[in-house]
Image (spheres, grey):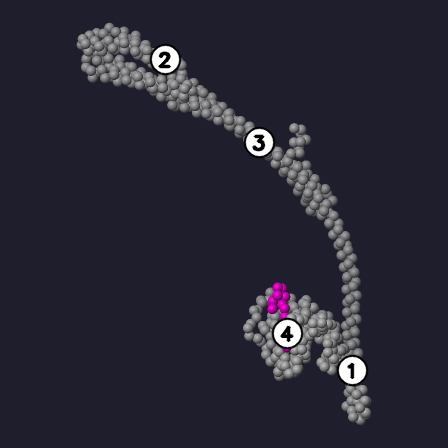
Amino acid sequence: MSLFSVRTWTLRRRVVALCLAVGLVLSVLGVFAAITAANSNKQIDVILNKTTPMRAAGERLSTAAVDQETGVRGFAISGDENNLRPYTDGLAAEERLLSEIDKLNEQDGTADARVSAVLALVRQRADAWRAAVADPVIDAVRTQGPETGQALVEAASTTEFDALRDSINDLQREILVVRQKSADDAKRTGTVLVALEVFAAVVVILAGAALLLLLDRLVTRPVTELAEQVRAVARGDFDRPITSEGSPELRTLADDVEGMRRQIAAELSEVREARQQIEWVNEQLKVQAEELTRSNRDLEQFAYVASHDLQEPLRKVASFCQLLQRRYAGKLDERADQYIGFAVDGAQRMQRLINDLLAFSRIGRLTAGFTDVDLDRVLTEVRSQLEGRAGGDAEIVWSDLPTVEGEEPLLTTLFVNLIGNSLKFRRADVPPVITVSAELAEDEWRINVRDNGIGIEAEFADKVFVIFQRLHARDAYEGTGIGLAIVKKIVEYHGGRIWIDLDVAEGTSIYFTLPLLAGVPVREPQQAAEGGSA
């Protein structure tokens, strides 16, 4: 594996490789530690469960031999069988202890040859002592009396018993040798375990240091450098390239950030160009605004002229025509009276047209600003203004109307025109009923003015909102044909829409919208209607 190929490894792959290597080393150490611990446990088990019981049995074996020798001497002196009990008890104890030591020595199938040999020697010398001393003395006492047995004891040699005791002592020494060997092995395995633990700790420390170094070289320092480059770009150095010498993941991230920087730089260049264009457009708009301001001043001047300079001679013409009509009516021929009537009517219609046109042009120009307008109060004022035109049989009703934002004089003019049209275009011999209602539709109020009059044909639904458009002859219905055009301009000035509902069975239904006033609670419509007969 080449160094270049390792350099191309991702951080995750390097960390995984490091963890695998450390895991492998610790696994090997763990296996050795397990084997060593098992051996140590085995040696400790030998000490606790084998050599220690063997040594205790050896000491009790020496006591059993002494008890046998004491029992024989006592029986020889007294001839009493009760005094022979230590001998019989010691003999039984000897057999039991020798079997126990032999069994412990062969435990786990690992019998010590020297212990086995000495154990066989102890059995042999015990049998020799009993054959040479104990059995003859006991037989003599039982057959010839205590004096004979005592004489045999005094004449007998202690060589066999001393040899027995020496062999028991040799057995104890061999057991001690086995115990010491197990202790030494346990101590050695303990030392090995400590060494393995120290080595494992060193491996873990070195692995941690290697991991920290790896993270520092591949993550911490490259991330710090990358963050500094990003901060430099954020401070406005959009032409500074972003690179990284860290791990492949960080290099990929740096490439992505570099791509984003280039995209931002390109879009920023476009934004700067767009800003220059916007500034140029703003300059043009400023020029156009100044031109529009000048045009509005000219329009206001025209309105002043229309309201004063043009109406003054028109009033004179109308006044003198009316004067001629009053003074010479019936004194001239019929045709002359007709001509004078035409002149008076034309002058009056011209005055109305000029006044309506002036009112239409002033909508949105001469403004007092928007305020909170209670439409209930507006409808009350409208009903009062139209009381003379409504007559005694007309009925104007409305539900609980909302508070909107707008200019109250304009909204009053709006309802005067709508309700005035409903009163004007009534059906013959049918009392007019005009209903005004409102409903909340998302972020706007939808207001409806409906009557039971002659209605509007679908083909004229858009034409009626055009200025000076009339659907009927002048002699049938009075007016200049500008009322609904004024209504539409007022609604649009307030940010709403207006249209005619063509899905009504009779009469006219006109809808218009007004934006919802923020912060004003919405009142639920009441069942009882306000208003009444006008």
**Distance from Cα at disc 2 to Cα at disc 1:** 159 Å
2 vs 1, front mark: 1
Residue at the spot 66% in from the left edge and 41% down from the top edge: 253
Q: Secondary structure at mark 1?
A: helix
For the point 62% across and 36% down, which residue is it?
11
Say which amino acid is labelled 1: Gly
Q: Are marks 4 and 3 in contact (CB under 8 Å)?
A: no
- Which label belongs to residue 20? 3
Compared to residue 443, the image places residue 157 above or below, namely above
Determine which of the numbered discs, if any, sits on residue 346 in the image. 1
Q: Residue at x 76, y 59 (%)?
A: 282
Question: Are discs 3 and 1 less than 8 Å apart at CB?
Answer: no
Secondary element at tag 4: loop
> Which label belongs to residue 468?
none
Mark 1 Cα-neighbour bin, 10 Å: few <14, some 14–19, many ≥20: some
Residue highlighted by disc 4: 505
Q: Which amino acid type corresponds to the residue marked 2 in the rendered image?
A: Val
Q: Earlier in the sequence, mark 3 or mark 1?
A: 3
Q: What separation in Å lies between label 1 and label 4 (alpha carbons)? A: 38 Å
Residues at circles 1 and 4 in contact by the CB criterion of under 8 Å: no
Mark 3–mark 1 distance (CA, rounded to whole Å): 108 Å
| Mark 4–mark 2 distance (CA, rounded to whole Å) | 133 Å
Please report the bounds of the magenta region as a residue range. 439-452
Q: Is residue 445 above or below residue 348?
A: above
N-term-proximal mark, 3 vs 2? 3
Is residue 210 positioned above or below 389 on the image?
above
Residue on which disc 2 sits: 118
